[in-house]
């Protein structure tokens, strides 16, 4: 069974146990059946909404279930949001004819406590019990980074038993290890044909790129070549995906534009009053097929921020950002005029974030196949945006490009919706 589904199952058991406990302590024996009959449908809907909330907060991401302080904070926020959704369902949309009050609190508390302990148990099982032995072969920077990620995150189910430079160096009996996985670096030679013997003994063999994609959700840029592109990339998704993407873009863009318009207008007034400068800021960005378009933003920097040309932003510490700019950036109001770009077709809701032509020219020289990210429409948000920090250097841009490659290869409507929901969570919690 997929490890994520095991976590979902643990949450379902937590919910079911807490629900049964609720019925037993809050109702008399003669009312058990009627209570179960009246409470089961709405509470099941509630559970499904909680699964969605936990997903949005990244609590089903194997790399995020490690019991740390940041994970605990994320879990608290998700549980609080779950309680608020329950309040909304039962008190503001009273379609089920019940007002559980204390029952809702007991259910949330019971579910929270049990899910927390279930997840600790599951983490321990993943990290110590349900693991596969791994042999690494090679010495690239990527393989070393993968090795570090496996060691730091045993819950993904891998345990490194050895690391060799070449296949010929493997010098132990493979029969001693069940479910062995060998991760091969790029360009590893197999002069003696021993790799065939590994296959005969049932050993799973994958390369570093596949391992990165499976466990780290990105693709190493050094592994990209013409054959990879031909074999793995399909930019012409099916008609249903294209249609649904267009519909979602139009609906979400209009909703966001209309609902945020009052905040945009108020922000525009304060921007103008601060330094009497222009309110809107247009910036050239590289879009689909390398076409340059104007990206719209509310101005958050000083009027002469780029009088000497384009400069990499340093994020929150950028001295060019005005006091008003800091506020609208924190609230992400400065980005909302980009809904116009989505309506115009310059942007999609989800895709690789468009870069400036000056930076693209530099990055294309230093990062192989960087222009490849322009084969699909850029996005207001994207996989790289929810998985990695703001790009401040060429190295950051390279890392984000590896996440973009993963998205370009694997994109579908479910990934898109997940990215949108995770973006909303990031906006409201950061």
Image (cartoon, helix red, strand yellow):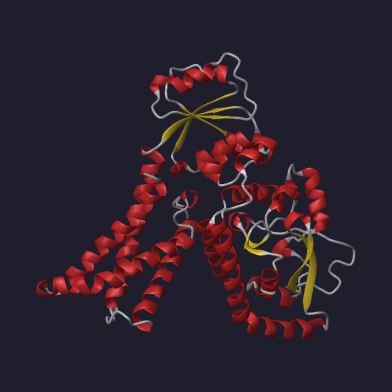
The location of residue 104, given as percent across then percent down, is: 30, 74
The location of residue 287, given as percent across then percent down, is: 74, 59
Residue 320 location, quadrant:
bottom right
Residue located at (82% from left, 51% from top)? 361
Camera-side residue of 342 and 113: 342
Answer left or right for 192 relative to 271.
Answer: left
Q: Is residue 5 above or below residue 299?
A: above
The location of residue 61, given as percent across then percent down, is: 47, 52
The reply to whether residue 314 is visible in this rendering is yes
Camera-side residue of 397 and 302: 397
Q: Is residue 166 above or below residue 129?
A: above
Camera-side residue of 307 and 249: 249
Residue 369 location, quadrant:
top right
Residue 354 location, quadrant:
bottom right
Q: Is residue 412 above or below residue 281?
A: above
Answer left or right for 170 relative to 353.
Answer: left
């Amino acid at each position: 069974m997929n490890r994520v589904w095991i976590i979902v199952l643990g949450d379902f058991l937590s919910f079911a146990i807490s629900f049964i406990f609720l019925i037993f302590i809050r109702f008399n024996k003669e009312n058990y059946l009627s209570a179960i009959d009246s409470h089961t449908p709405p509470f099941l809907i509630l559970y499904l909404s909680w699964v969605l909330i936990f997903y949005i907060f990244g609590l089903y991401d194997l790399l995020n279930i490690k019991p740390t302080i940041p994970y605990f904070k994320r879990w608290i926020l998700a549980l609080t949001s779950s309680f608020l959704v329950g309040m909304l369902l039962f008190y503001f949309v009273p379609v089920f004819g019940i007002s559980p009050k204390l029952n809702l609190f007991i259910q949330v508390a019971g579910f929270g406590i049990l899910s927390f302990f279930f997840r600790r148990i599951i983490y321990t099982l993943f990290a110590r019990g349900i693991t596969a032995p791994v042999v690494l072969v090679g010495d690239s920077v990527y393989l070393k980074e993968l090795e570090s990620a496996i060691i730091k995150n045993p819950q993904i189910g891998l345990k490194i038993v050895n690391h060799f430079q070449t296949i010929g160096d493997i010098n132990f009996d493979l029969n001693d290890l069940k479910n062995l996985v060998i991760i091969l670096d790029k360009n590893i030679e197999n002069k003696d044909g021993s790799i065939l013997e590994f296959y005969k003994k049932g050993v799973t063999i994958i390369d570093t790129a596949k391992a990165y994609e499976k466990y780290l959700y990105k693709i190493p840029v050094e592994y990209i070549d013409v054959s990879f592109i031909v074999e793995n990339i399909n930019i012409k998704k099916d008609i249903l995906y294209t249609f649904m993407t267009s519909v979602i873009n139009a609906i979400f863009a209009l909703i966001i534009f209309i609902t945020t318009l009052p905040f945009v207008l108020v922000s525009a007034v304060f921007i103008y009053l601060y330094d009497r400068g222009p309110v809107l800021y247009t910036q050239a960005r590289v879009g689909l097929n390398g076409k340059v378009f104007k990206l719209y933003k509310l101005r958050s920097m000083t009027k002469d921020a780029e009088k000497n040309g384009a400069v990499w932003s340093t994020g929150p510490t950028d001295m060019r950002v005005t006091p008003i700019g800091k506020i609208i950036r924190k609230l992400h109001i400065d980005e909302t005029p980009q809904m116009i770009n989505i309506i115009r077709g310059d942007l999609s809701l989800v895709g690789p974030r468009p870069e400036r032509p000056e930076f693209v020219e530099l990055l294309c020289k230093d990062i192989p196949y960087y222009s490849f990210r322009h084969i699909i429409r850029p996005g207001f948000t994207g996989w790289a945006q929810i998985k990695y920090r703001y790009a401040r250097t060429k190295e950051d841009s390279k890392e984000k490009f590896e996440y973009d490659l993963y998205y370009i290869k694997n994109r579908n409507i479910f990934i898109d919706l997940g990215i949108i929901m995770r973006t909303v969570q990031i906006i409201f919690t950061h």
